[in-house]
Image: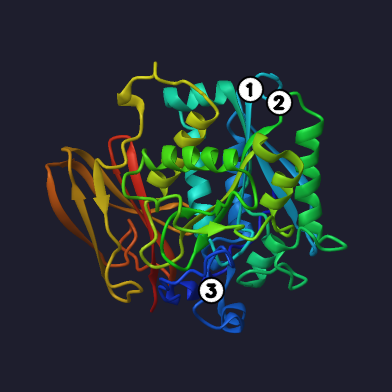
């Protein structure tokens, strides 16, 4: 396939882990909040923000192995990198299927947007009855990395031309990435019998909160605000306490702006498309990407009227069966401790993964009773050799439920 490039994976640095938590979000202005540190410092020090284009190419190989996944290049960036789109569906040609669009990593420094999107992909390609039902009745289009140039250059928000392509939808001429995505939207809306019903723009905010950017009736319509509250409330119900309420961030209070992707959706398709920005947590405390993805996916299915009540509860993801907390210290040198709580007894597996998802070591694999636990990782792999500095992940799985968090080893 044309995207298969076998390149050396560079050493990833996690300077974004030093991002300070900032609890102030200016309402109706910047969706992702104010970057708490100097952008020039991020541009100079960051290396792919924890997940680079080479890592994406590896994942594309893995995803394409599934018969119901199609991978296509929609076009090229400023530096001629392909913008890759996954289409996930058992029946992509059936015109009665619901169509959903998701794109992530517009702002490279908001890498949490990818990890949530990655978990959405993981759910959709799984062999669970729920995933099979969704694939048979929906068509998901997903761009995991919309701004690969910015990712590789280590820019917090911009593409290779130094332009913030999130707010460049009214530029003349359009940046290449914006033109690619806009043309794809036009193609799906005007050349298919089943146009997009939900369009999610995945970001992460420095306020360290999970929320949807809500569009006021002044910039949309009274009926659309009801639909927004329905969508956001439905998503919340699958992750109690995980998301802020619909009125946490209210935008478009002075009318409809014209510079955002959601502006394009509203101006061209109004209430027919639920187009929203989702903001994950952009801070050390970020995590629970699987619980977040499960809630967003099920909230989306409920919104489009997909009835999966006949699928037994035992096949659904229950995000509250256990909880994990951030390892400490983090970053760490010699060793780190991973705390977690089991709320239902069962088999527990704890796995250390490297930056491209390869297993480094299993820290635990056995039955756990209800209780609080603490496990130590000393930076060794399964061969009892010290691993290199860089980003690693620990994944805790209880039954069918898993949670992944990232950590940084510095020598």
From the viewer's perspective, is residue 4 above or below residue 355? above
Provide the residue designation for mark 2.
Answer: 194
Give the quarter of the figure containing the N terminus.
top right
From the viewer's perspective, is residue 259 above or below residue 348? below
Which numbered disc flags the more N-terminal residue, 3 or 1?
3
Nearest the viewer among 115 and 206 is 206
Residue sitting at x 51%, y 81%: 37
Residue closest to the far top: 310
Q: Which mark is residue 34?
A: 3
Q: CA distance from mark 2 to mark 1?
A: 7 Å
Label 2: state its secondary structure: loop
Q: CA distance from mark 3 to mark 2?
A: 38 Å
Residue sitting at x 47%, y 52%: 357
Q: Can I make out residue 2 in this image?
A: no
Provide the residue designation for mark 1.
Answer: 97
Nearest the viewer among 224 and 143 is 224
Nearest the viewer among 8 and 219 is 219
Which numbered disc flags the more N-terminal residue, 3 or 2?
3
From the viewer's perspective, is residue 328 above or below residue 127? below
Q: Can I make out residue 311 in this image?
A: yes
Label 1: state its secondary structure: loop
In the image, is 388 to the left or to the right of 267?
left
Dot 2: within a 10 Å radius of its alpha carbon, few (fewer than 14), some, or many (20 or more) residues? some
- Is mark 2 in CB contact (under 8 Å) with mark 1? yes
Q: Quadrant of residue 349?
A: top left
């Amino acid at each position: 396939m044309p995207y298969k490039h076998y390149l050396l994976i560079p050493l990833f640095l996690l300077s974004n882990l030093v991002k300070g938590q900032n609890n102030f979000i200016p309402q109706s202005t910047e969706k992702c909040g104010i970057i708490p540190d100097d952008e020039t410092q991020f541009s100079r020090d960051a290396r792919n923000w924890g997940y680079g284009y080479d890592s994406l190419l590896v994942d594309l190989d893995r995803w394409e192995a599934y018969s119901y996944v199609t991978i296509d290049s929609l076009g090229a960036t400023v530096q001629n990198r392909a913008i890759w789109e996954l289409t996930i569906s058992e029946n992509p040609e059936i015109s009665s299927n619901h169509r959903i669009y998701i794109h992530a990593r517009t702002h490279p420094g908001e890498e949490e947007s990818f990890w949530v999107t990655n978990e959405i992909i993981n759910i959709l390609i799984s062999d669970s009855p729920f995933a099979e039902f969704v694939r048979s009745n929906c068509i998901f289009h997903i761009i995991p990395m919309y701004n690969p140039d910015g990712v590789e250059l280590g820019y917090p928000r911009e593409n290779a031309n130094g332009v913030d392509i999130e707010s460049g939808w009214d530029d003349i001429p359009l940046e290449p990435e914006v033109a690619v995505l806009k043309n794809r939207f036009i193609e799906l809306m005007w050349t298919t019998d089943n146009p997009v019903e939900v369009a999610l723009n995945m970001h992460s905010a420095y306020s360290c909160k999970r929320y949807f950017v809500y569009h006021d009736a002044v910039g949309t319509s009274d009926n659309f605000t009801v639909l927004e509250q329905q969508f956001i409330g439905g998503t919340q119900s699958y992750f109690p306490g995980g998301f802020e309420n619909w009125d946490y961030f209210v935008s478009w209070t002075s009318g409809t702006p014209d510079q955002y992707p959601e502006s394009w959706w509203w101006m061209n398709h109004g209430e027919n498309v639920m187009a929203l920005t989702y903001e994950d947590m952009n801070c050390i405390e970020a995590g629970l990407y699987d619980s977040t993805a499960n809630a967003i996916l099920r909230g989306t299915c409920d919104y489009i009227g997909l009835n999966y009540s006949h699928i037994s509860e035992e096949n659904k993801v229950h995000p509250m069966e256990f909880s994990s907390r951030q390892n400490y210290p983090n970053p760490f040198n010699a060793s780190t401790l991973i705390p977690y709580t089991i709320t239902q007894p069962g088999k527990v597996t704890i796995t250390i993964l490297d930056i491209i998802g390869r297993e480094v070591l299993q820290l635990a694999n056995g039955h756990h009773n209800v209780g609080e636990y603490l496990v130590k990782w000393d930076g060794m792999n399964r061969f009892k050799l010290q691993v290199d500095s860089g980003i690693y992940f620990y994944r805790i799985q209880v039954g069918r439920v898993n949670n992944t968090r990232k950590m940084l080893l510095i020598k």
